[in-house]
Amino acid sequence: MSDPIEISSESESFNSRPFEELHADHVMQCWGVQGNYKPIPVVSADGCWLKTADGRRIFDLRSAHECINLGFRHPKIIEAMKAQMEKVIYVTDDFATESTSLLAEKLAKLVPGAPNKKVWFGQSGAGAVEAALKGARFYQYNRFVRRGAGNLEPAMQYPYPYKIISRYRSWHGSTTGAASVSGDPRRWFIEPFVMPGVKHAPDAFCYRCALGREPEDCGVACADYLEYMIEMEGGDKKIAAVIVEPVVGSNGIIPPPPEYFPKLRKICDRHGLLLIVDETMTGFGRTGKMFAIDHYGIEPDILVMGKALGVYCPVAATIFSGKVAEAFDENVFGHGQSFSGHALGSAAALAGLEILTAPGFLEEVTRKGQYLGEQLQKLSDHHPSIGDVRGLGLFWTLELVKNRKTKEPFARPADKYAETVIRKISRFLLDEKNLYIPADKFGIWIVPPLIVNEDELDFIVKAIDEALKIADAEITQ
Ligand SMILES: Cc1ncc(COP(=O)(O)O)c(C=O)c1O
């Protein structure tokens, strides 16, 4: 046993300052102006609630960046983590641990398609997206160049299909590759140094169709346009993959029309492209099914997950279908990170999956989601600022507009960091109602932990009902 560490008088005085001041002085806030950073000191968290140093209880309506689907301090997860900590926390992937092996097998079976899949583990959604993008390109390289499949003659400046098609309303993470494929304005922070070869397609967004279609005559024209892009960009001679969120998250919580994914799957197959589905925000019960793609009955080639996967631990995963994984049987998978396949995080994830797959759990999420959706729909009867109410499971948004008829928004994409009425609402809800909601530029998110109860849902809707008066006062119709 080593000697106890002596604490110097300097560190004592350092620690006498309130910790939130130390935090503000020394922690860089994500996506924030640092001089304005005023974090609220939290001393504990339980269920859906945070407890602050001054005794307030705040409901976390964004489930801690959509990571804490099972609520804070779930006893079964904590028990599993403690048990794993007594055994082994992390070893490199030259070794196998029971928890990581079991988790990989479970994920391979849980996601759609045959279970002969392989899992790459990371720690963040962005890292897992990078693995998916590189994996898709390596797969195409191996297929075209090494195996001599396909004819690559015309205009082959680059020796294998490398382009990626994504969509404008999307967010796939802050690292350079992931931000490059994102359409969200946060991509602008890396311009002009974006990864080459990314093309953005129109969104599957019926409330604001980029192609000017009405839902009645939609015909999923956005998917047809994406196919047109594939042809004009060189098809499978130039394009490696299409990457999409199954239900768009940070860019407006947008479930696609039901025909979209079956059509997109066929398009990708027709052109030999891989379909990457990014479930980082939507996975693990958020939409009432284990994965949002389960609503649409198709099988992705690569599936990305993160956030709620590790419950309380930073765990992310990229799942490669058998077809893609097989390309690496005799070729290097050129990607990796320290802490990949973390045994402690895997134990937490396994315990989380046990809860999510318990009989009735996801059905209950669906039931609560329907109840929430009905209550939100009722709000639009007397709040003219509500343009659209949409969602799936416990993943909802109220899109707010200045004018319901013209759909004039309160904010445009370039206003991401502007002071909008939506920010005012979010501040009101936090200060006056102890409800923490994300300040999105398009509207209000309702993304509670999945363990939320009906009383809590009523409390949320009532608080939002009151807050919407702020937006109603600024409408123009
Ligand atoms: C769909 C999607 N993909 C990827 C990411 C990036 O995840 P992370 O912040 O863990 O890197 C996010 C984050 O919000 C996301 O919503």
Image: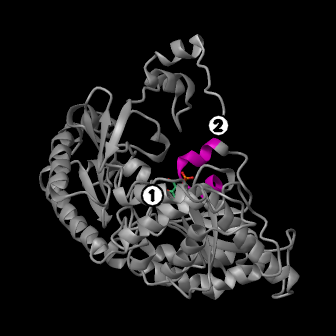
Magenta stretch in the rendered image: 178-189
Q: Secondary structure at mark 2?
A: loop
Q: Residue at x 50, y 19 (%)?
A: 15
Q: Which mark is residue 311?
A: 1
Q: Position of residue 178 (x, y in %)?
A: 63, 56
In the figure, is residue 212 to the left or right of 433?
Answer: right
Q: Position of residue 367 (x, y in %)?
A: 22, 70
Kindly indicate the quadrant of the structure image that contains residue 127: bottom right
Kindly indicate the quadrant of the structure image that contains residue 351: bottom left
Tell me if mark 2 has few (under 14), some (14-19) or many (20+) residues whose alpha carbon lies within 10 angstroms of its own: few
Q: Position of residue 80 (x, y in %)?
A: 45, 61
Q: Is residue 183 magenta?
A: yes
Q: Which mark is residue 1?
A: 2
Residue 220 visible at all: yes
Q: Nearer the viewer, residue 281 or 389?
A: 281
Task: State which quarter of the image contains the N terminus.
Answer: top right
Amino acid at dot 2:
Met
